[in-house]
Image (cartoon, rainbow, N blue to C red):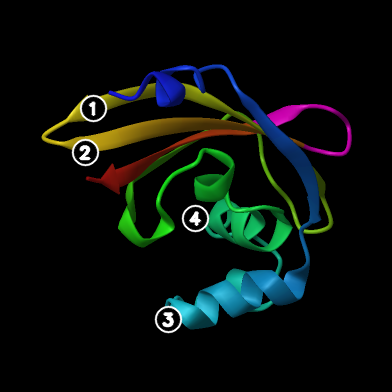
């Protein structure tokens, strides 16, 4: 494994904020054909809604920040640990850090941990995602 990549463990990425809007909840529900009325009305978020927060709220490319070759990057795994509830109208702040890096089968794996806090400073979700860089 690259020493430069190992040095990224503990690296904190730029925090960002996202307002949970009813329209975005409905867009996701329609995109994945989950036509449950609460989702279409934007009254309740879907379990995978944090992905929307990541795509629409984040700034710079994580791959670029980590010095990974974007053409060889894959999204490997995603997990969500709900600690509280994310509700429509919440303003969510996301703090991210590189939790781990390792090499396996000639691929680099980068595990990112994200903590989602609501407008009251309460942690409502922790997510972990694995980014894979093929050699």
Q: Is residue 75 visible?
A: yes
Front disc: 2 or 3: 2
Q: Secondary structure at mark 3?
A: loop
Range of residues picked out in magenta: 118-124
- The image quadrant of residue 82 is top right
Q: Are marks 1 and 2 in contact (CB under 8 Å)?
A: yes
Q: Position of residue 49 (x, y in %)?
A: 57, 57
**10 Å crowding of disc 2: few (<14), some (14-19), many (20+):** some
- Which one is in front in this view, the residue at disc 4 or the one at disc 2? 2
Magenta highlight on residue 52: no
| Residue pointed to by mark 2 | 107
Question: Viewer-proximal residue, 12 or 34?
Answer: 12
> How far is disc 4 from disc 3 in space, using C-alphas?
13 Å
Mark 4 — residue?
Answer: 48
Q: Position of residue 79 (x, y in %)?
A: 40, 39
Q: Residue sitting at 48 percent across and 21 percent down? A: 99
Q: Which residue is mark 1?
A: 103
Sequence order check, earlier mark of 1 and 4: 4
At x 76%, y 38%, the residue is 15
Q: Which element is circle 2 on?
A: strand
Which label's residue is closer to the chain start, 2 or 3?
A: 3
Helix, strand or loop at disc 1?
strand
Task: Please tell me which of labels 4 and 2 falls first in the chain.
Answer: 4
Precedes in sequence: disc 3 or disc 1? 3
* Comes first in the chain, label 4 or label 3: 3
Q: Residue furthest right?
A: 120
Give neighbour class at mark 4: few <14, some 14-19, many 20+ (Cα, 10 Å): few
Q: Can you tell which mark lies on residue 93?
A: none
The residue where tag 3 is placed is 33
Left or right of residue 127, residue 107 in this image = left
């Amino acid at each position: 494994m690259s020493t430069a990549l190992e040095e990224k463990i503990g690296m904190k990425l730029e925090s960002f904020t996202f307002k949970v809007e009813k329209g975005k909840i409905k867009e996701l529900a329609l995109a994945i054909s989950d036509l449950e009325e609460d989702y279409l009305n934007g009254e309740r978020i879907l379990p995978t809604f944090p992905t929307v927060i990541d795509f629409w709220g984040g700034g710079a490319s994580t791959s670029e920040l980590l010095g990974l070759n974007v053409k060889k990057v894959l999204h490997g795994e995603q997990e969500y640990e709900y600690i509280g509830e994310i509700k429509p109208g919440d303003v969510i702040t996301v703090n991210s850090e590189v939790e781990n890096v390792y090499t396996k089968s000639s691929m680099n794996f980068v595990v990112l941990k994200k903590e989602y806090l609501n407008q009251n400073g309460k942690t409502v979700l922790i997510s972990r995602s694995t980014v894979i860089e093929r050699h």
